[in-house]
Image (cartoon, rainbow, N blue to C red):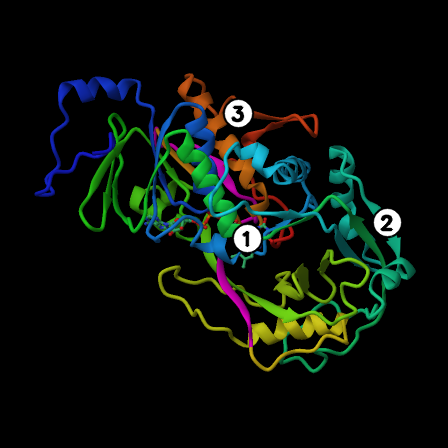
Amino acid sequence: MLPWQYWSSSRTIVKMNQKWAKQMQTDRNVTIIGAGVVGCSIALALARRGFRTLNLDTLPAAGYGSTSHSSAIVRPIYSHITSCAIAHQARRHWLNWADFLQVEDERGMARYTECGGLVLIKQGEESRYDANLTAMQAVGVPYELLSAGDIKTLYPGISLASYGPPVPASHDSFCSPSKGEISSGILVPQAGYVSDPQLATHNLQVAAQKHGAEFIFNARVAAFNISHSEKHRIELDDGRTFFSATVINAAGPHSSKINQLAGITNQLKLSTRAMRHEVAYIPANARHFERGGRFLMDMDAGFYQRPDGKDMLIGSSDPVCDPHDFVDPDNYNLEFTPQWNVQTYRAAQRFPEMGIPNTARGTVGLYDVSDDWIPIYDKTSIPGYYLAIGTSGNQFKNAPLIGEIMAAIINTENEGNDHDKHPACLKLPDVGQNISLDFYSRNRDIQHTSSVMA
Ligand SMILES: Cc1cc2nc3c(=O)[nH]c(=O)nc-3n(C[C@H](O)[C@H](O)[C@H](O)COP(=O)(O)OP(=O)(O)OC[C@H]3O[C@@H](n4cnc5c(N)ncnc54)[C@H](O)[C@@H]3O)c2cc1C
C-alpha cells in the first residue's frame, strides 16, 4: 500500500489514526494530477528534493495526453523577457538531456535537434516583432536579421509575396496575394525541436522514479475533497482514495475540470479552456530542406512549420480570422476537418512547390489555453493546492524547468512565506537571470499576447 493510500478492500476509507495525523504536520507527500510532460517534470523536481510524489493519470502511460500531439518546437522567440529567458535556459537542458536527467531510459532518450528557426516579416510590420527582439537582447539570445535575398537563398522555392492578413477559406481572396512583400526575417540559430515528446515525458518519468516517485496509470481523479486544515482527499472513479497535504493540478486540457472538482473556479481571475488544434504532416518537396531544415513562423500567411524527417509538419499560428475551437476535452472531434486544408493551403502559398496529398495525415490535439496564452504556475487560496496549468500550446519546450518553477513556489510556501506577497524566484544560471515567478501568477493582469506565439 502506498503511503498516500487509505483504501480498504471494501472501499471504505480507513480513519486516520493519531500517528498519521501527526505525520500530516510535516507531510512531504505530494499528489500530482496528470502525468503529461508538466506532471512528470514536477515529479522529477520534487522527488529530487526529497518529496514523495505520486502522479495519477487517466491514461495508460506518461505523455499520452496533449503532450503526445506536441510539435515540440523549442524557441526563445517570445514577447516577454521572462518567457524568453525560461525557454532559453530550458534549451540548455534539452541540449544536455541525458546529463540533466542523470538516467538511462531503456526505451531510449528523446533527441533535441538544433535546426534553428526563422520568423518571416512583412514590409511595414517590423515593429510587430520589437518586443521579441528586445527580449532576446535582454536574455542574450543570438539572432540575425535577414534580408529578402537571404531568405531566398535559404529557401530557393519560397514565395515572398504577402498573403496577410490571413483570411478564412470562404473568403474570395483566400490563396491570393495581398499587397506587399516579405522583406526580412529573424533567424535564431539556438532553437529547434524535440524528436518525440512522448518519449521525452517517459524519460522524465524514469528519472523521477529513480528518486522514488510513484505513478499510477488508468487512474482518473473523479472527486476531490478540499480541506483547509487537513489533508485533501482525492478519489478515483474506481473508488480508490488518497490523502495528501499537497495536490498539484497538472491535468493539461482537463485543468478547468479539476479546478471545478476543487471548487475553486469562481475564485480564479484567469480561466483555462481546452482548444482543439490540428497539425498536418506533409512530405517535404525535395528542395525544401536542401539548405537546412529550420522551423519557420509565418504570421503573414498564418502558419508555422518544422521539419520532421522528410516531412514538414504544419500548424496554425492562430490568426484572428480563424474561430477558436474551444471544446469539451472529454468529447471532441478527433478527425481532421477543413481546418487541415486551410493550414496546408496557407503553407503552400509560401511554398508553391509543396504538394498537398489527397489524404490528410497528422494529429489532432488540445491546447490548455489561458486568457493571455501564458501559463499559470502558482499556489491557490486553498492551502496545499497548486496549479501548473494553462500551458497554451507553448510550454513543452519549458518542461525541464516547469518542475523547478513549481518546486521553488512550493518551497517558498512550505518555509512559511506567502508566494503572493513575496514571490519565489528561479535562478537561471546559463542566462544569468533571476526570474520572479509572479509572472505566472493566477492573479496577474492579463498580458498582451494573442496567440500560441505569445
Ligand atoms: C498540437 C499541439 C502542438 C504543440 N506544439 C508545441 C510546440 O511546438 N512547442 C511547445 O513548447 N509546446 C507545444 N505544445 C504545447 C505542449 O505540448 C503542452 O503545453 C504540454 O504538452 C502540456 O503538457 P501537460 O502535461 O500540461 O498536458 P497533458 O500532456 O495533456 O497531460 C495532462 C495529463 O493529465 C491527465 N488527466 C486529465 N484529467 C485527469 C483526471 N481527472 N485524473 C487523472 N489524470 C487526468 C491526462 O490524462 C493527461 O495525461 C503543443 C500542443 C499541442 C496540442
Dot 3 amino acid type? Pro
The stretch drawn in magenta includes residue 364: yes
Q: Which residue is mark 2?
A: 145
Q: Nearer the viewer, mark 1 or mark 3?
A: 1
**Residue 127 visible to the viewer:** yes
Q: Is residue 403 left or right of residue 143?
A: left
Q: Considering only vertical position in the picture, is 325 above or below 376?
A: below
Q: Which residue is mark 3?
A: 423
Image x and y of residue 135, in percent: 73, 39
Residue at the (30%, 46%) spot, across then down: 261
Q: Considering only vertical position in the picture, is 186 above or below 278?
A: above
Q: Which residue is mark 1?
A: 196
Secondary element at image label 1: loop
* Sequence order check, earlier mark of 1 and 3: 1
Query: Label 3 crowding class (10 Å Cα cut-off): few <14, some 14-19, many 20+?
Result: many
CA gap between label 1 and label 2 equals: 30 Å
Q: Which is more toward the observer, 450 or 412?
A: 412
Query: Label 1 crowding class (10 Å Cα cut-off): few <14, some 14-19, many 20+?
Result: some
State the extent of the magenta-drawn residues as a range: 360-383
Image x and y of residue 139, in percent: 73, 34
Location of residue 429 by image quarter = top right
